[in-house]
Amino acid sequence: MEALNVKDLQVAYDRKAVLDQVELSIPKGSLTAIVGPNGAGKSTLIKAILGMLKRSSGQISILGKPYSPKNRNVGYVPQRGSVDWDFPTNALDVILMGRYGHIGWFKRPSKQDIALAKEALHKLGMADYADRQIRQLSGGQQQRVFLARALVQDAEVYFMDEPFVGVDAKTEKAIIDLLRELKQKGKTVIVVHHDLQTVPEYFDHTLLLNRTVIANGPTEQVFTEDLLQKTYGGALAFFSTNGDKRVMS
Amino acid sequence: MTYEGWILLTACLVGISCGMVGCFLIVRRMTMLADAISHSVLLGIVLAFLVANSLNGIYMLIGATVIGLVTTFAIQSLHNSGVQEDASIGIVFTTFFAIGVILISLFARDVHLDVEHALMGEIAFIPWNTYTVFGIEIPKATGMLLCITIFALLVILMFYKELKLTSFDAALAVTLGLPVALIHYLLMGLVSITAVGSFDAVGAVLVVSMLVVPGTCAYLLTDRLSVMLLYSCLFGAASAIFGYYGALWLDASISGSMSAAGGILFLLTWVFSPRYGLLRRYRAMITS
Ligand SMILES: Nc1ncnc2c1ncn2[C@@H]1O[C@H](COP(=O)(O)OP(=O)(O)OP(=O)(O)O)[C@@H](O)[C@H]1O
Ligand SMILES: [Mg+2]
């Protein structure tokens, strides 16, 4: 089954099309990378799919049904720069917000919601930081909080905008372990990813994007020098070390 | 109750209602909208007076809420069509305010609606204008403010989660299926009725300070939104009380002293706040 299917998607800011004729489908249970240069429209694609931006055209279905927030089957981790770090809230509180969809109107988070949030915090090695205001966390810790929040949303399809940016090797390992665990549970994880070197290692499905879909398929078929050059407009330098192909963007 | 008691109660209600609602404007970084709404609300009051031909509080509330929402909507529309946000705010509220001023000078010159009153308010007159509810004689403005404060409190309690999430992360709110735009306008409606309720007491200029200053003080003292709301109400009430006695002592304008008291409280918090105060940061700099 398909986790995500997008047909004829067009998105424009101020009438200028940023994404055009986007058609893609992503298999259920995959770990998918969205790859493309800065300004390619990766964040825009996720926001348009999830209805945070108006689409000029396009149909979105998630797990075979037209996308609706009411189905509560998607989770979202925002790009770092879009978070208000000065908001009066702490780590545990942010994670609890992931439960708001399950709690319903006029009700407060239950003991069970709080227990779930604490468990997620613990799982990401953040148990000691529950009361920290979010600006006073390090970049990696902030990223973990938002991942924990996505976890407690208990979704089927996760969208994550650059979860690996600004984290050290240890956090990166923790995050990828978590993504693999989600995959094992049959969840689908779609990740905007900038580090081309780790794409083949981490992801089994890849979407190359630059204003439109350049290629979309299993990583070993899509992640080729040719298609990458096409995606990045020839601005990539390839060089080999020890027979390994390495990529610099 | 005594004359003084009514004034203090009214002033505290202004501080509490504005303090509560203002917190959400602060965490949404929309304090400029407080300025806009509190000024254009004047137009709503005048229009309500011209249409209903009465100074009844209910008509004013309706008129002000409608104009408050129209203001928010007009600013949003201008901004969406490519005008910078602060410029949109400036254009919309000055225009609405100006229309209000012109309408007053044309049609409402003789009634209890004059521009100076609208700008500065006059809390000292409030206890003279009363009605009787359940056998108690209470000032009209105080009664209205009491209803508004209770209403604002109920709305915030009922929709606390939603108001908080849409303020912090509208994107997540959208994916969870919350009606983000509706909640935004609900908040703007609250700002409008709070502004009009406080109008009589403190006027348009000082409503802004009541909406912004207590919340800003509270923000310096806590990392929890719920605690910030509570502190903000306390700061609002405190500046009202200190302001009143300051005015007596100096023989100055009551509403002016209330704002000034808010300013002084802010200065003190800003310097001495144990979390984000100047002194604490200074000490942290020295020890590091
Ligand atoms: N709010 C906006 N208004 C107008 N144009 C925008 C807006 N947001 C993004 N854009 C433009 O849309 C294009 C795609 O932006 P988007 O943020 O989706 O890129 P991205 O692929 O996520 O880039 P990055 O790797 O830097 O995160 C860019 O050219 C950008 O300038
Ligand atoms: Mg992006």
Image: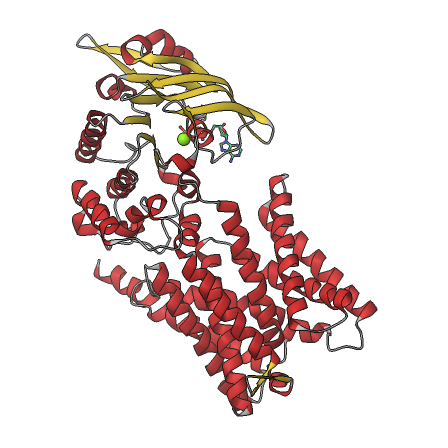
A165, A19: nearer the viewer: A19
State the quadrant of the C terminus of chain A: top left
Q: Is residue B220 visible?
A: no
B257, B229: nearer the viewer: B229
> Percent from the top left, x then y, of residue A57?
55, 24
Q: Residue at x 46, y 58 (%)?
A: B24
Give the image quarter of residue B234.
bottom left
B183, A16: nearer the viewer: B183
Relative to B272, residue B160 above or below? above
> Percent from the top left, x then y, of residue A184?
19, 25
Relative to A44, residue B13 above or below? below
Query: Which residue occupies the extreme right position in the image?
Result: B106
Q: Residue at x 50, y 75 (%)?
A: B13
Q: Residue at x 78, y 64 (%)?
A: B102
Q: Is residue A36 left or right of residue B55?
A: left
Relative to B158, residue A126 above or below? above
